[in-house]
Image (cartoon, helix red, strand yellow):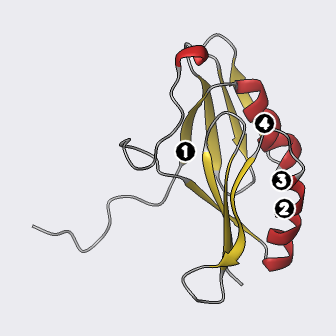
Amino acid sequence: MSNPTPLTKGVHHVGLTVANLNLSRSFFVDTLGYQQLGEVPDYPAVFLSDGHTMITLWQAKDPANTLPFDRHNQIGLHHLALAVDGPDSLNQLHHQLENHDDVEIEFAPESLGGGPAQHMMCIIPGGIRIEFIAAK
């Protein structure tokens, strides 16, 4: 039985477990300009937002024994895709991330599916795979 009206209303937040909470928080706040909305030091977790999307970062319990993400063999979040203003912003971000010691660029800005949109992919501090997309 199908329901013609979706029961959900979009993404409220995305929760990510990271190997190093401080490095990951710094990336979102200092590099991407997110605001920290709050934190739970005992958990430990931080709550961040760019004004459109809220992201919760949790510290992995035993970072020394975490496994790096393997998109071919792990169930769950494949990557997080974040929008940027346009191709110029994407190129500027790419240049900034190239000089960031803790970021691994998977591929530089390129056409997305042969269309006018462009995207790039990287792995940020804490081990999360992020795609940045310029739709215009």
Q: Which residue is mark 1?
A: 14
Query: For the residue carrying disc 1, how many other residues have a C-alpha within 10 Å: few (<14), some (14-19), or many (20+)?
Result: some
Query: For the residue carrying disc 4, how many other residues have a C-alpha within 10 Å: few (<14), some (14-19), or many (20+)?
Result: some
Question: In the structure shown, which secondary structural element does the residue marked by tag 3 occupy?
Answer: helix
* Badge 1 vs badge 4, beta-carbon distance below 8 Å: no
Q: Is residue 70 visible to the viewer in this orientation of the structure?
A: yes
Residue 86 x %, y %: 78, 77
Q: Residue at x 63, y 42 (%)?
A: 55
Q: Is residue 35 visible to the viewer in this orientation of the structure?
A: no
Q: Is residue 32 placed above or below 29 in the rendered structure?
A: below
Which numbered disc flags the more N-terminal residue, 1 or 3? 1
* Badge 2 vs badge 1, beta-carbon distance below 8 Å: no
Cα distance between the residues tagged 1 and 3: 22 Å
Question: In the structure shown, which secondary structural element does the residue marked by tag 2 occupy?
Answer: helix
Residue 85 x %, y %: 79, 73
Q: Which residue is mark 2?
A: 93
| Rendered image quadrant of residue 126 | top right
Question: In the structure shown, which secondary structural element does the residue marked by tag 4 occupy?
Answer: strand
> Does 83 sit left or right of 43 as displayed?
right
Q: Which residue is mark 3?
A: 97
Q: Which mark is residue 36?
A: 4
Question: In the structure shown, which secondary structural element does the residue marked by tag 1 occupy?
Answer: strand
| Rendered image quadrant of residue 48 | top right
Outermost residue toward the top in this view: 42
Which amino acid lies under the numbered mark 3 shown in the image of this protein?
A: Leu
Cα distance between the residues tagged 2 and 4: 20 Å
Which amino acid lies under the numbered mark 1 shown in the image of this protein?
A: Val
Q: Is residue 26 placed above or below 63 in the rendered structure?
A: below
Q: Which mark is residue 46?
A: none
